[in-house]
Amino acid sequence: MMTVSYLEKAIVEEEIRPNKCGLVRFQSSWWPAKCDRKITLKPGDLVRVVRLDNITLIVEA
């Protein structure tokens, strides 16, 4: 089971829109990711990993 530290960073690879999944690069691999906030994250944005929900990373700017 993977654990995620709140301080870990990921890079947005595919746009993440409100209530939609995108992709991030995290720990040398690509992960589906969502953001709980009403913002759009663009490719290249550096985000903080908040938690892991099944196989989806929850991130914030």
Image (tube, rainbow, N blue to C red):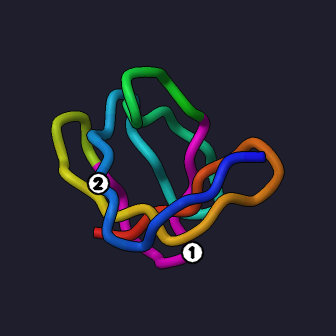
Q: For residue 58, which numbered disc appears in the image?
A: none
Q: Nearer the viewer, mark 1 or mark 2?
A: 2
Mark toward the start of the polypeptide (1 vs 2) = 2
For the point 32% across and 70% down, which residue is it? 7
Looking at the picture, how far across and down is residue 18, in whole percent? 54, 63
Q: How many callouts does the rendering have? A: 2
Q: Nearer the viewer, residue 49 or 60?
A: 49
Quadrant containing the C terminus in the rendered view: bottom left
| Quarter of the image where one finds residue 40 | bottom left
Specify the amino acid type for callout 2: Lys
Decide: few, some or many residues near mark 2? Use Cα within 10 Å; few <14, some 14-19, many ≥20: some
For the point 32% across and 53% down, which residue is it? 41
Looking at the picture, how far across and down is residue 42, in whole percent? 26, 44
> Tag 2, which secondary structure?
strand
Q: Nearer the viewer, residue 37 or 29?
A: 29
Q: For residue 36, which numbered disc appears in the image?
A: 1
For the point 56% across and 46% down, which residue is it? 33
What secondary structure characterizes most of the magenta part? Answer: loop
Give the CA separation, mark 1 to mark 2.
16 Å
Looking at the picture, how far across and down is residue 54, in whole percent? 83, 51
Magenta part of the protein: which range? 32-41
| Quarter of the image where one finds residue 9 | bottom left
58 horizontally vs 53: left or right:
left
Does residue 42 lie above or below 30 as drawn?
A: below
Specify the amino acid type for callout 1: Asp
Residue carrying label 2: 9
